Amino acid sequence: MKKNILILSLLIISVQSWAECKIGDLEIDPSASQTPEGTPNPSNYITITGQKVLTKALANINIGTLIKTKTDTNIAQSNVIAFEYIFKKPINLNSNELASGFITGTSNYDGIVFAAPSFGSAYGSQQNLFMSSISGNITPNQTQKEVLANETVRVGIYYNQISKKIGYIVNGVDRGYTWSYTTPLSKMKFGIAIEEGFYTSNSSSLGKEISYEIISDHSKLQFTYPTGTTDICGTPL
């Protein structure tokens, strides 16, 4: 009997150890979605697979959709917690073409909003951008932007619960601690917004992927973080 209990305990520990750290289920927010004419259901053109939201550049149709976690995600009380975002979209678009959106993770409405929009040539030098802004009581309260002509942009975010500082990494380049916050993290809500449109029927970008993904499990985080960092579930990197 003791042997059976020991085996069962080991199995439970093993399952818990290998359980993937997730943010919870994502859902489309119908109140914040702009539904194209003749397309009554946003799920007709938006695909949600796990923590990835995907659409493609479509001709003569404009899309604006907000996807968010159904419930708040519990955050481990580690010294430093980290997660990553992946943006993928066409670049160097033509005319007024647009592939835009943002990803945010907020705690008590405090958080950083990251965006990697692509604009058409009508926007001049501002075609391919990477942007960050704040929500809530994060400081400094300013929007930062830079030209970043990459079809794929991977961003790492790390919160230091001791110093109350937020740092970030862009495509492997650590920008260091950039923002400060006051309220300790306990729960977070994640949101993804997608906006795309103004593609003509002969656009060279038609069919190209426009996707946004949240990476939360320690085994999938790619960047180097401060010593002692864990994923949002508390598993060391």
Image (cartoon, helix red, strand yellow):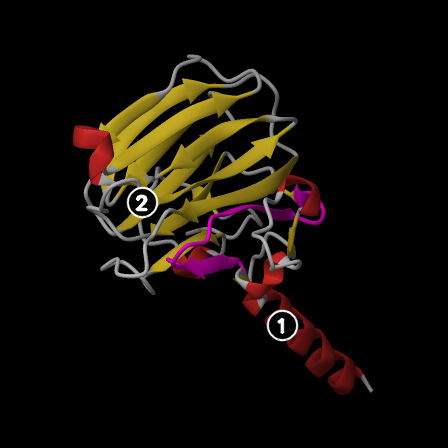
Is residue 60 visible to the viewer in this orientation of the structure?
yes
Residue at the location (53% across, 60% down)? 46
With 198 as the anchor, is 15 left or right in this view?
Answer: right
Q: Is 105 displayed left or right of 224 in the figure?
A: right
* Amino acid carrying mark 1 in the image: Val
Q: Which residues are magenta?
A: 50-73
Label 1: how many Cα within 10 Å (few below 14, some 14–19, many 20+): few
Residue 42 lies in what quarter of the image? bottom right
Residue on which the image places disc 1: 15
Can you say whether 184 is above or below 120 in the image? Answer: above
Q: Amino acid at mark 2?
A: Glu
Q: Is residue 198 left or right of residue 215?
A: left
Q: Which numbered disc, 2 or 1, marks the residue closer to the eye?
A: 2
Q: Residue at x 50, y 18 (%)?
A: 138
Which quadrant of the figure has residue 213? bottom left
Secondary structure of the residue carrying numbered label 1: helix
- Residue 134 on image: x %, y %: 47, 22
Count of number-bearing discs: 2
In the rendered image of this protein, does residue 103 appear above or below residue 206? above
Residue at image location 64% in from the left, 48% down from the top: 69
Q: CA distance from mark 2 to mark 1?
A: 47 Å
Measuring 60% from the left and 73% from the top, which residue is drawn there? 14
SS at mark 2 in the image: loop
Does residue 63 show up magenta in the picture?
A: yes
Q: Which mark is residue 97?
A: 2
